[in-house]
Image (cartoon, rainbow, N blue to C red):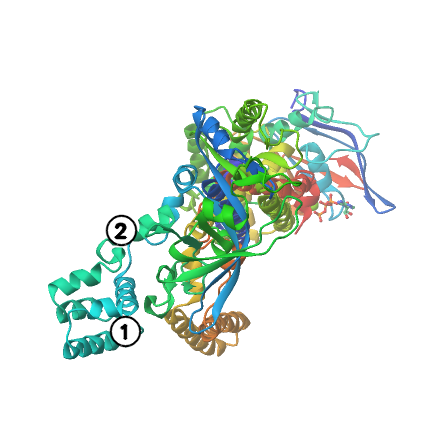
Amino acid sequence: MYQTLLTTRYLTSRVIPLIAVGAVALCVALVIVVVSVMTGFLDMVQSAGRTLMGDVIISYGISGLPHYGALQEQLEADPNILGATPIVDGWGLLRMPYPDSKAKQSETVQVWGIETESFSKVTDFSSSLQWKTPTDNQRDWLLLDAIKKNADEVRIGMDDAQWNAFVETVNTASSTLNFANANLWEDIKTSVTEEQWEQILALDERLSQPELVHKQGLALERNGKPGIVTGLHVSDGNERQRDGTYKVIRNDYWWLPRFDGTLTMLPVDSQGGIIEPESIIMPFVNEFQSGVFMIDESRIFVPIATAQSLLHLDAAEIIDVDDPTVVLGVDPARATSILIRGVEGINAIELRKIVHGIYDEFRASMPDNTLVLPPSRGDPGLSINTWEEQQRSFTGPVEKERELMRTLFSIVYLVVAALILSIFWSIVFEKTRDIGIMRSLGASRAGIVWIFLQYSLVIGILGSALGLLLGWAITKNINGIHEAMGNPPLALAISAFVFAGATCVYTFVRARSGMMLPIVLGSIGLITFAGIGGLVLFIRYIGGLVIWDASVYYFAVIPNNVDWPSAIVTVCGAVLFCVLGALIPSAKAADTDPVKALRHE
Amino acid sequence: MSDTPILQGIDLKKTYQLGRLEVPVLHGASIQIQARAWTTILGTSGSGKSTLLHLLGGLDRPDKDSGDVLFKGASVWSRTNRQINRYRNHDIGFVFQFYHLLPELNIFENTLLPTMIAGSKLPKAQNKAKATKLLDQFGLGHRLSHRPRELSGGERQRAAIARALVNDPDVLLADEPTGNLDEETGNEILDVLSELYDGGLTVVMVTHNNEIACRGDVVVNLRDGHILEN
Ligand SMILES: Nc1ncnc2c1ncn2[C@@H]1O[C@H](COP(=O)(O)OP(=O)(O)OP(=O)(O)O)[C@@H](O)[C@H]1O
Ligand SMILES: [Mg+2]
């Protein structure tokens, strides 16, 4: 067909269509990158949330759900349910050692009292724990702690000279350990007898059994006492690295599992009034990282019994108001919510229906003489929601934002259409005579229209394919690119300046011929290259450019998966709008009067 | 010259609209083109020669109250657009003063263009062979892949003639084919047309040059929008 022949010739014989292809590619790539990142972000929020909270949540205000153990059992008996776990949650104040100062750090935290075993079934608690075993430095600090705390015990069996030498070793080691890796472990081991070494190791179980660090976190206890697991960003002792990982500051000195913290919570009475605050000192046993910054920053886990007693939600005797000596019965312990995880493949809405049924059964199975009845399903304080419903306030805006972005970016299509329209308008004008020639040779109006539609189709397809490729490449490497922006390589600046110098020489040499184009091109090149070089140096000077800030975007890394459905829609849309843009110029071309066109010239 | 003419213009009128001003060009021109004849239309510049040729060739539509163009006895201007396209493509070959080759296509592709536009049912190879043969015949066999701008005026006009002939038209309409060429080159072009005429082609040529007009066997004069036959 002559249209195809002309399309290929028009495409290869001029620069404008290539610019159009490039522009379409850039537009498509832009949309793909932005929408992919936002979709990835939303997916991350949802999957992270689900692994942290299960699929369906039953909650009953701050007064809590009594007889939750029975409900949990009934839930777990259902074949559609993988696990159910009670939670006592409330806000509290956590005081912990403060980095580089004698003062304490106090943080408002969201306290979750959990039943570790069932909680691990419902969520990914185990794998979210940060410390599986201590690092060498952490182990050395544990050793120092144990020795300092139990100095008297360690001294047994050492004479004064031996002891002084030992103290000397310990002190030098501990002062260097702050800054560098010391050989503390070996130094101490060699300075004491084997028997003494065994005694020292026995001071802290974690010294001889490093895997206990993880186990204690999982069980929320150390030496039979309840412990705290905190979000990795709760303490300032962990410093966030640029790549999203965390590093304990001062060479692991501020490693939280070395210390104790004070947790204070405000219990509320049955009328909703606030009673005296309750406090407890507990060791930190581990830290967790969920990947959701908001959670890592404010959540801590304690055993459910601890939370219950701090909030006065534990079992208590009910006493007659008139005669305090008469015990009427027992007010059972309460849980503020129950997290439920369905078996693989079950839909959350379906699961919620099943949970409704089980709840009704649970309520009906309460004996008539029960003193404290759980709320009926009609109680406004009781809610049974899927994870998504529960988090609507959080994910809802993000979803809206994505829709807004998509809508805003559909303006890109209009840009594409306008671009093609203006380019084609000028091409059609320029080709008026040729169109007249073809019409005089018998080409139909439709045939002429098809030349330009096909032309725009090819530009659209080439452009979007290129854009897809570019968008894919950028999205896949977005973390690398972002990191490079944070620390742009000096080589980039140097090569930019070399190019700037080269264009300078080129301009100077060519300018002597008196031609205008080389001067203009050379100046543009010079400014561009020098600008890039300068920008790189500037970014390096200000210490890097960080756009994706975890404290704003909740996640440590930028999502880097292409949202294929959106990408395909974008590509099709770009092609469509290319063709739409060419429609008006094509119609103009088709209406060209052959005789008038031929009289051109 | 006894048969019915292959191409007839009957009482052709054409008025151009220049804003509110009406510019009447043809006032009812009638012309008979006999098959296998060489008809020359002679007229001063601006007399409407090109206009007449465009009407005959199906490129421009005559006025409403005008007569018609008959090709082989059948009306041209009462045809559908589709049929007129086919008439332009298949029955008539046009040669213009300014060659009018497409600059993006090479000489061979330019020549082949009408067959591609026709969506010709003939095998491609046959069309290509036809185009090659014509270009060979006009001494352009070695320049097939050259672009028009790389050719001289005479060569371009010969390529244009090859293009006009590739679909085997019945009539060749040439609008001042030598108008843009020096005398010697112009004569070469006229020799080519003579050859074709000798081969049995119907040729209609427009010129304002009396010397060139003597090449034809019928010369008609166009004056004041009327045909004055000699
Ligand atoms: N589109 C148009 N609008 C207005 N006037 C026109 C138009 N086309 C042609 N004319 C006028 O019609 C007249 C005849 O034009 P035409 O081109 O047919 O003359 P011609 O005999 O071919 O002249 P030439 O020898 O210079 O080619 C001229 O006066 C011209 O100005
Ligand atoms: Mg003319």
Callout 2, which amino acid? Glu
Mark 1 Cα-neighbour bin, 10 Å: few <14, some 14–19, many ≥20: some
Return the chain for callout 1: A
Mark sitting earlier along the chain (1/2): 1
- The answer to which of A167 and B130 lies nearer the viewer is A167
C-alpha span from label 1 to label 2: 24 Å
Q: In this view, does A441 lie to the left or right of A487?
A: right
Return the chain for callout 2: A
- The answer to which of A570 and B81 lies nearer the viewer is A570
One can see residue A125 in this view? yes
Question: Within 8 Å: ligand 1 and the Cβ of disc 2?
Answer: no
The secondary element bearing badge 1 is classed as: helix
Q: Do labels 1 and 2 share a chain?
A: yes
Q: Mark 1 points at which residue?
A: A174
**Residue B228 sits in quarter:** top right
Q: Mark 2 points at which residue?
A: A211
Q: Position of residue B104 (x, y in %)?
A: 51, 47
Q: In this view, does A72 lie to the left or right of A489?
A: right
- The answer to which of A185 and A494 lies nearer the viewer is A185
Residue A578, relative to residue B170: is it above or below? below
Callout 1, which amino acid? Ser
